[in-house]
Amino acid sequence: MKVFRSLNCPHCNLPFLPHTDDPRSPRQLFCDVVLCSECFLKERSLDKSKRSHQCTFTNCLSNQFILPPYFLNELLINESLKLSAENQGYILVKPLHLPECPICQEEYSIETEPFQPFRLRCNHLICNACFEMIRKSSTESSDQFKFKVVCPICQSVCLRSKDCVKKNNVLKNFLRELPEMLKQIEDLEKEGKPNDSKDCCENCEKSFSFSQMFSCFDCNEKICGSCAFRKHRSHTVVDLIVKEIEKIIDETSKSVSSQISCYKEIFPQLHQDLLDNISMFEKSLLSKISNIKRENIERARKESFDCRKLGDDFELISEKYLPTLREINSNLLDLLNDPNLGFVQVSIFHDSTDPKIEEKRMIEELEEESEKTMTDQALQAPPRSTRLKIKKCSFFDSLKQYS
């Protein structure tokens, strides 16, 4: 049975696995090649002249350029794909809903160049047509990367050249293989051979439905009821469905952990970069203020105005950023309260209290505290200039708490 070669590591020829902590998890290199983590680490440990992977980029194997191949991980967890019985690669078990461009919502196609997938440096995909539409000329870069594109998913700024539309990527290779794999499904159905709802006994090689199959733990074989009785009577045998469900649970757990851990790594780094940039901005702006010329009052006023304008611009940018953080936190709380998750936050801290009564009590306490705060502020309101200063401090404090 044929497997998708595009979903195997080109070095070890083993299939990728969608778990970040697995040696066979995919790593997207700067040059558009994808290796499994094990091969990537082996290649990186070698001198460049001894590596199997050779390309024109000097730092292709540098961690600086390694980002999760999101589009590939989404393919690997697609329910239309599963690993072959010999674990030699992925096979198609039912028709696949093709990935779509996040901008125009059109399905990617290898036959039509405008709808071929184009990989951005952040490893998200858009179609060639949308790349042509949203790209902007960049004066900040060399002729090699003369176009600037803002990713519609993560908002990263990516510098690319027009020639990049002709470059290969894993999804393009996958789309080239797809017609042949679809034909394989049709041929199997015509011949009555096992597909996603049937499997083959590894002893008698006959085809049976999952409900008629068993799994022998001692031999690690998938067997039919007849072979289980005749050849595995003294072994530990369970329904194949039970083993498959355990496998589904394990794969789902690893997949979800992979999704979450990816962002647990990205968010702290982004926040640290943000704090570093804020510190640099603050240091530069204070240095500019301390260097205001003291000989000329008009010039001093103009330089002061420029500095205040920079401060206002910073505050405006930051005030746009804070609601996004609050929205993320709010959305996470909504996920926690999703009935499908089964997590009730109130009941964790108050096991003996009815959640509805506790929620009502908390709302009443918040309302009372809010009224008291507003009354105190009205009685103790400082002059306007002082209020402005307080507002600035509150802003920086609120920024820090989200860092």
Image (cartoon, rainbow, N blue to C red):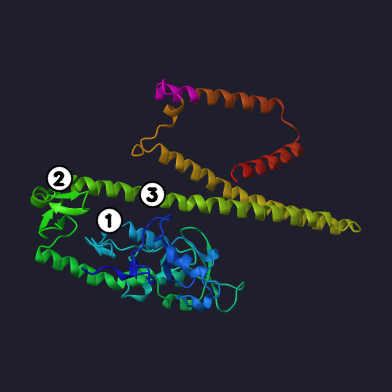
Residue visible at 15% across and 51% down?
Answer: 210
The residue beneath circle 3 is 256
Q: Position of residue 135 (x, y in %)?
A: 50, 70
- CB atoms of marks 3 and 1 within 8 Å: no
Residue 55 drawn at (x, y percent): 49, 78
In magenta, the rendered stretch is 350-362
Q: Assess whether residue 290 is covered by the magenta stretch.
A: no
Q: Reading the chain from its start, which is encountered first: label 3 or label 1? A: 1
Q: Identify the residue under disc 2.
A: 234
Secondary structure type for disc 2: loop
Q: Quadrant of residue 105?
A: bottom left
Of 310 and 238, which appears nearest the observer?
238
Residue 316: x %, y % from top left: 63, 51
Q: Is residue 8 left or right of residue 186?
A: right
Q: Secondary structure at mark 1?
A: loop
The kind of residue on which mark 1 rests is: Glu
Asked if the residue at tag 2 contacts the one at tag 1, i.e. Cβ–Cβ closer than 8 Å, the answer is no
Instruction: Name the front one of labels 2 and 3.
Output: 2
Whole-angstrom CA distance, mark 1 to mark 2, is 35 Å
Distance between mark 3 and mark 1 Cα atoms = 14 Å
Check if mark 2's residue and mark 3's residue have beta carbons within 8 Å: no
Task: Confirm whether residue 322 shows in the render.
Answer: yes
As displayed, is residue 396 above or below residue 109? above
The three-letter code of the residue at mark 2 reads Ser
> What's under tag 3, amino acid-wise?
Val
